[in-house]
C-alpha cells in the first residue's frame, strides 16, 4: 500500500512539473461533497473564463475561506449541486478544484455542456490578475488539453462573450484577450 502511495505522489509531482500547476483538491480546501454530478464529455471546444466578483484572496487560508463561502452560496442559496466552476484561481497563485474534471459545471447558461469554466477569485473590474494567477490558469488549460478534456485548438472566451454580464471584469478581460486561444 505504501508503494502505491509513493507512486501516486510521484505521478502527481511529475504532472505538476510538466504543467506547472498543482491543483488544490476540494478535500484540501474543505469543500463539501456535491449533491449530484453529471458527466462532462471530453474533447470540448471551449473554455470560459470568469471572475467571482467577490473577495480577492492572497493567502491559502483566505482563498479556502472564500471558496467555502462561494460553494455555500451556490449550493444553499441558488440550489445548485455544487460550486459552479470546474476550477478557481486564487490570488495566492493556486488553482483550486471546483467541480473538477469531467463534471458538468453551472457557470455559463447554454455553454456548460460544451466548455469548462475557470473562475478567478475576486472582482477584476477592481483587481488585476497577478503573473502567478495567469500562470496557474494557463497551467489548468494546458492540463485540460493533455487530458483530452478540451481540444488543443479550443476557443477561449470570457463569460461576457457567452452571456449578458461584465464578467470576467475589465482587467481580466483585457488580459485573456492576449492569450493564444482567445477568439473575438
Image (cartoon, rainbow, N blue to C red):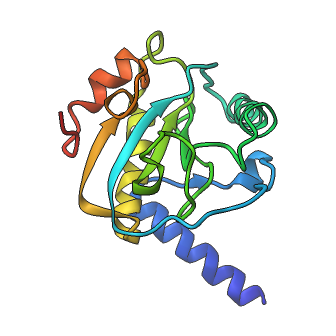
Quarter placement of the N terminus: bottom right
Determine the image quadrant of residue 94: top right
Residue at point 55%, 29% (across, down):
91
Count of labels shown?
Answer: 0
Residue at point 63%, 24% (across, down):
57
Q: Which is more toward the observer, 140 or 37?
A: 37
Position of 91 compared to 175: left or right?
right
Q: Point out residue 50 in the picture as x, y percentages from the top left corner.
A: 46, 32
Residue at point 70%, 32% (across, down):
70
Is residue 94 in view? no
Position of 92 compared to 41: left or right?
right
Q: Residue furthest top?
A: 126
Position of 126 compared to 66: left or right?
left
Q: Point out residue 172 in the picture as x, y percentages from the top left corner.
A: 37, 24
Is residue 101 in view? yes
Q: Point out residue 61 in the picture as x, y percentages from the top left corner.
A: 74, 33
Above/below status of 109 relative to 21:
above
Q: Point out residue 162 in the picture as x, y percentages from the top left corner.
A: 35, 34
Above/below status of 42 relative to 72:
below
Quarter placement of the C terminus: top left
Amino acid at each position: 500500500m505504501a508503494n502505491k502511495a509513493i507512486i501516486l505522489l510521484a505521478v502527481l509531482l511529475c504532472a505538476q512539473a510538466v504543467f506547472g500547476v498543482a491543483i488544490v483538491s476540494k478535500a484540501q480546501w474543505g469543500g463539501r461533497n456535491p449533491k449530484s454530478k453529471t458527466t462532462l464529455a471530453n474533447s470540448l471546444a471551449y473554455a470560459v473564463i470568469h471572475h467571482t466578483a467577490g473577495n480577492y484572496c492572497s493567502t491559502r487560508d483566505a482563498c479556502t475561506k472564500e471558496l467555502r463561502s462561494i460553494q455555500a452560496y451556490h449550493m444553499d442559496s441558488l440550489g445548485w449541486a455544487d460550486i459552479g466552476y470546474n476550477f478557481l484561481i486564487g490570488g495566492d497563485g493556486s488553482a483550486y478544484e471546483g467541480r473538477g474534471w469531467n463534471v458538468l459545471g453551472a457557470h455559463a447558461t447554454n455553454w456548460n455542456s460544451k466548455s469548462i469554466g475557470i473562475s478567478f477569485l475576486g472582482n477584476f473590474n477592481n483587481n488585476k490578475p497577478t503573473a502567478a494567477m495567469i500562470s496557474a490558469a494557463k497551467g489548468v488549460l494546458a492540463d485540460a488539453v493533455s487530458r483530452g478534456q478540451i481540444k488543443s485548438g479550443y476557443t477561449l472566451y470570457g463569460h461576457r462573450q457567452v452571456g449578458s454580464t461584465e464578467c470576467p471584469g475589465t482587467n481580466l478581460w483585457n488580459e485573456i484577450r492576449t492569450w493564444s486561444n482567445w477568439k473575438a
